[in-house]
Amino acid sequence: MSNVIGILLDRKTYLGILRKQTGYEHIDYYNQAAVELGMTPFYMCLKHMTMKSALGLSYENNKYTLKRLPIPKVIHNRAMTLSAVSLKKLKDIAKISQVFNGQNRHDKLLIHRMLRASANSSAFLPPAMRYTSDNLGKAMNRYESFFVKPTNSSVGKGVLKVSVIGNLLWQVWWGKQPPRQLDEQQAIAFIDEKVNGQSYLIQKTIPLAMYKGRPYDLRVSVQRGAKGLWGVTGIAGKVAANGRHVTNLARGGEAVICEKLFYSNGFDPLVKRAQVEEAALQIAESLGQQIPSLSDVGMDIGIDHHGEIWLIEVNGRDQRYQYKHLKLNKTFYRTYETPMLYAKYLLSK
């Protein structure tokens, strides 16, 4: 079974394969890419794995077969392992298999510190610091606007935006609620209540370029491919909903072709896309040197009014569905094909 590639999924996604209910995961694209590359995809979840074997679904001859196989030599991790037990099990499996993207939920502040230490990437970072009462006070003295966001969440959950509106008044956005106008002490109390002792960071607001009066950023899919090298597989724009402060599609944002956004701001679409790709590759290479298993990420990258490029955050499990929204079907397929190319490269080594 030297051509078997393990694909590790969340249990719910794994159990949904035969019912074709796999959420954001387009399993058929993994199958198509693997077959074209002469490989056999073997779908697994941690619950049904031991240190020697796994019970999973093998895709061969256009059908799935439930099998118990030895742990594959190469595993592409798409499962979200958040509990201590699942993390330990995945780390143990990684001792006997090449698991790429093993840890796929990364602390935002840790990523910031890693990139801050890199000469190639530090220029793309907006100022950020860990949330504490003292640091909140510093941010309110230094910045006209900033975000307070969880260090370990995704799709814009739990994010607050804080902006000064004069005379010691602050506007605070939280969730779907209308913004609140609070004095300084009220704002501090409200933010502290929402943070509630959890791990948060404070990040200076990037004055994002706008599209039809709404801020936008970019989701950039950066993946290792056939030769183990980083490449940009696709870029999609994400425009915030009216009155919202986050651009995530899961929070009402709209997917828009990136060139359309660039053109609307007077940026040369070809030049700006090339600049974004170069920045994303520099960031990925910097992080890859410090997190060796990193291989498949979705970066949120912002462009300010002047065309400067900023990293907002790095997502270790890119959901990729923005390309489906935009009917960029070839790009959507390549985001599944590229990890399979990387898996084949690892097998050949």
Image: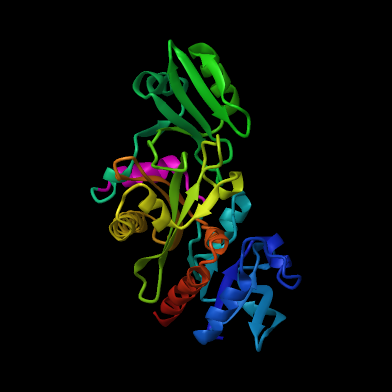
- Figure check: 186 above or below 238: above
Q: Given the current orientation, which residue lies at the most extreme left position?
A: 119
- For the question of whether residue 227 can be seen, the reply is yes
Write the start and end of the magenta stretch as one range: 105-118
Residue situated in front as seen by the camera: 172 or 46: 172
Q: Nearer the viewer, residue 34 or 218?
A: 218
Who's the residue at 61% across and 76% down the image? 42
Give the side of residue 144 with respect to residue 56, left or right: left
Residue 114 is covered by the magenta coloring: yes
Give the total number of marks visible in the rendering.
Answer: 0
Q: Position of residue 248 (x, y in %)?
A: 54, 47
Check the image and report above or below for 68 versus 213. Answer: below
Residue that extends furthest to the right in the rendered view of this protein: 19
Quadrant in which the C terminus appears: bottom left
Give the image location of residue 298, x and y in percent.
Answer: 46, 56
Q: Tell me the colour scheme of the image.
A: rainbow
Q: Where is residue 228, by image quadrant?
A: bottom left
- Magenta stretch secondary structure, dominant: helix
Residue drawn where x is 59% and y is 55% of the image:
80
Occupied quadrant, residue 197: top right
Q: Is residue 178 magenta?
A: no
Quadrant in which residue 52 is drawn: bottom right
Q: Quadrant of the N terminus?
A: bottom right
Q: Tell me where residue 203 appears, x and y as whole percent.
A: 41, 34
In the rendered structure, the answer to whether residue 172 lies left or right of residue 270 reads right
Q: Nearer the viewer, residue 69 or 317?
A: 317
Q: Position of residue 196 (x, y in %)?
A: 59, 26
- Is residue 196 visible from the viewing direction of this image? no
